[in-house]
Image (tube, rainbow, N blue to C red):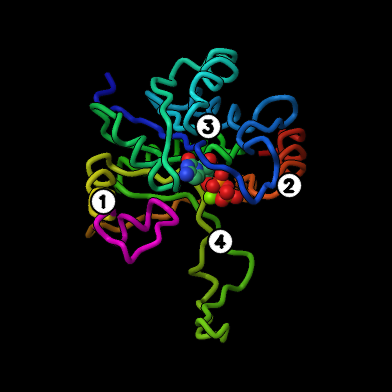
Amino acid sequence: MNEEKVCAIVLAAGQGKRMQSSMPKQYMELLGKPVLYYSLKVFEESAVDEIVLVVGAGEEDYCRREIVNKYGLKKVAYIISGGDERYLSVICGLSVLRGCSYVLIHDGARPLITVDLVDRTIEEVKRYLACVVGVPSKDTVKLINKDRVVTSTPNRKYVYNIQTPQAFSFELINKAYKEIVKRSDITVTDDAMVVETCMDMDVHIIEGSYHNIKITTPEDISIAEVLLGKNCI
Ligand code: CTP
Ligand code: MG
């Protein structure tokens, strides 16, 4: 019997400003189905036990009807509304979880996630308690200062582009988020940095996939359709 419950928080409460579309990007169609459907389907087929779907206020019924019920996604246990920033939506998701040992936090705007990668993430989080999916940076990265002058060039061997899922022991991430909200000096851009900042715990990297793109700007829709259509993820 699986005594360690694994939950997933799928985030879809953003406004998609960079997409410049009247419809939020998570509901735009990819090969005839909404962007959000794809990642929910993958979590449904993975070893995750329960899914919390976080959506914009007032979008709960639409999501239940047009995505969760329509496609028979049985693991979605909660559909709740999120906050004005991504990290606030994560806090909303964490607040409804009960009896959860591990939590995977995923951007609903990443439809090209695979069951294999989710299941590998679950194995790794059970071992390391904090881990994030990422890929080696193909580009050289430079740090600059406020005058736009380069201050250093990190060794590319050690530079990763971070994706989701990001996975943690529930106790660890819940505590870390409770701490971070007390800090007004920090802009939270991913979940791992909350652990890095507030907790004495190493965050491990899981080798991800260059196909696991985030739908952010209009050309990403065409790119995702090509990747999905070729089924080459
Ligand atoms: N997200 C969320 N709640 C927010 C902001 C973002 O749940 N207040 C979710 C988005 O729906 C998305 C993921 O977090 O699945 C990653 O965020 P991002 O790609 O930045 O999406 P948006 O914030 O919607 O887009 P933009 O920044 O262009 O407005
Ligand atoms: Mg955003």
Q: How many marks?
A: 4
Residue at (41, 34) in percent of width and height: 9
Determine whether label 1 and label 2 are within 8 Å by CB: no
Instruction: Give the CA distance from mark 3 to mark 2.
Output: 26 Å
- Residue 136 got which mark? 4
Q: Secondary structure at mark 2?
A: loop
Q: Quadrant of residue 212?
A: top right
- At label 4, the amino acid type is Pro
Q: Secondary structure at mark 4?
A: strand
Instruction: Give the CA distance from mark 4 to mark 2.
Output: 24 Å
Instruction: Give the CA distance from mark 4 to mark 1.
Output: 26 Å
Q: Is residue 187 magenta?
A: yes
Question: In the image, which is nearer the foreground, mark 3 or mark 2?
Answer: 2
Q: Which percent across, then down, holds residue 122?
A: 39, 37
Query: Which quadrant of the figure contains the N terminus?
Result: top left
216 over 99 or under it: above or below: below
Question: In the image, which is nearer the foreground, mark 4 or mark 2?
Answer: 2
Q: Is mark 4 within 8 Å of ligand 1?
A: no
Residue under circle 2?
A: 218
Q: Earlier in the sequence, mark 4 or mark 1?
A: 4
Q: Which residues are magenta?
A: 181-198
- Residue 115 got which mark? 3
Q: Is residue 85 left or right of residue 216?
A: left
